[in-house]
Amino acid sequence: MDENFIVKGTCMYVKLPQDLDCNNAALIRSEADKIMERENIRTIIFDFEKTNFMDSTGIGVIMGRYKNVKLIGGSVLAINVNAAVEKILTLSGIHKLIRINEVSGLKMPVK
Amino acid sequence: MNSTNKIKIEFDSNTENIGFVRVSVAAFLTQLNPTLEEVSDVKTAVSEAVTNAILHGYERGEGQVELKAILEDHVITISVSDKGMGIENIEQAMEPLFTTKSENEHSGMGFMFMQAFMDEVKVESNVGEGTTVTMKKRIGCEQI
C-alpha cells in the first residue's frame, strides 16, 4: 500500500501531496478506491498539511470519495487546511458536505 | 509601473507540465508585488486553463500549448492557447458543473474558478482549430 494511505479500524487516513492537481489526482483516486473496496471504511481523513496548491481536479477527487463513503453512511474530514486551499473548498461548495479543520493537532498514525 | 513586460511559454500537452507552468507564471507575477492570495488565485486560474487545454483540447493526446503573460499597469493578462478540438458550445462549457468527462470525476468547476479568481475571462474557440482563453486580473488594488 502507498505510504500516504493508512487504515486504522474503519478510518482511512490520506496524506495529500504538495500539489493536488490533475497530474496526481488519478493515483490518489485509484489507491483510495482500492482500499475502500477491500476494507470497511466509514471515515476518510484528508490531511492537507503538505498541500499548498489545489485546483478543481482536487475537488473532483474529494467529491468522488465523499460520494462513495456517503453511500454507506460515512463521512469525510479535511484537516490542516491552509487559507488558499480553504478558499477553493468553500468556493466549490464542498465545505457544506465535509468537515474542515474541525480537528486540530491530529498527527498521521503510525503504520 | 508604466512599462510592460511579457513572457511566452510553449510546452507539450503533458500533465507533468501543469505545475511548472503555474509556478513560472507565479514567479513572473511577483514583479507586481502581489499578495499571497493574489498569487494563489492566479496559480489556480492558470492551472485550470492549462488543464483544460491538455485534457479537453487535446484529450491527453500530443499537441502544443502556448501560454503568454503580459504585465502592464498593475494588470496581468494571461492567454492559454491550444490547437486542439475546440469547443462547440462555449456558453454551455462555462456553466458551473457542466462537464463532458464526468466518468473521470471532473468537477465541472474549471471555468467557474477562472471567473472567480480573475477579473475577466474570455474564451475564443473554433471547432477543429483550437481554443484560446484570455484572463485578466488587476494586482495590488488595495495599495493604489
Image (tube, coloured by chain):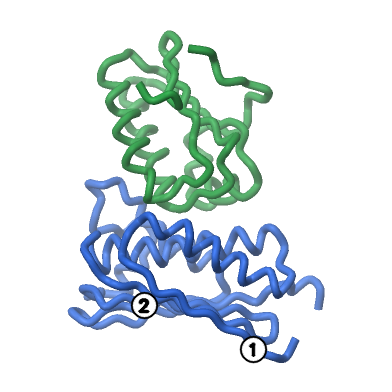
In which quadrant of the rendered image does the N terminus of chain B lie? bottom right
Name the amino acid, label 2. Answer: Ser
Residue B107, image x and y in percent? 36, 51
At numbered mark 2, what does the secondary structure look like: helix, strand or loop? strand
Q: Residue at x 72, y 91 (%)?
A: B2
Chain under label 2? B
> From mark 1 to mark 2, how far is it between C-alphas?
21 Å
**Tags 1 and 2 on a common chain:** yes
Which hue belongs to chain A? Answer: green
Which hue belongs to chain B? Answer: blue
Name the amino acid, label 1. Answer: Thr
- The residue wearing badge 2 is B81
Residue A54 visible at all: yes
Residue A83, image x and y in percent? 65, 46
At numbered mark 1, what does the secondary structure look like: helix, strand or loop? strand
Residues packed near mark 1 inside 10 Å, few (<14), some (14 to 19) or many (20 plus): few
Horizontally, is A63 left or right of B3 in the view? left
Residue A68, image x and y in percent? 32, 29
- Residue B4 numbered mark, or none: 1
Residues packed near mark 2 inside 10 Å, few (<14), some (14 to 19) or many (20 plus): many
Q: Residue at x 26, y 70 (%)?
A: B63
Horizontally, is B8 left or right of B36 in the view? left
In which quadrant of the rendered image does the C terminus of chain B lie? bottom right
Decide which of A38, A90 is in the foreground and name it: A38
Horizontally, is A47 left or right of B52 in the view? right
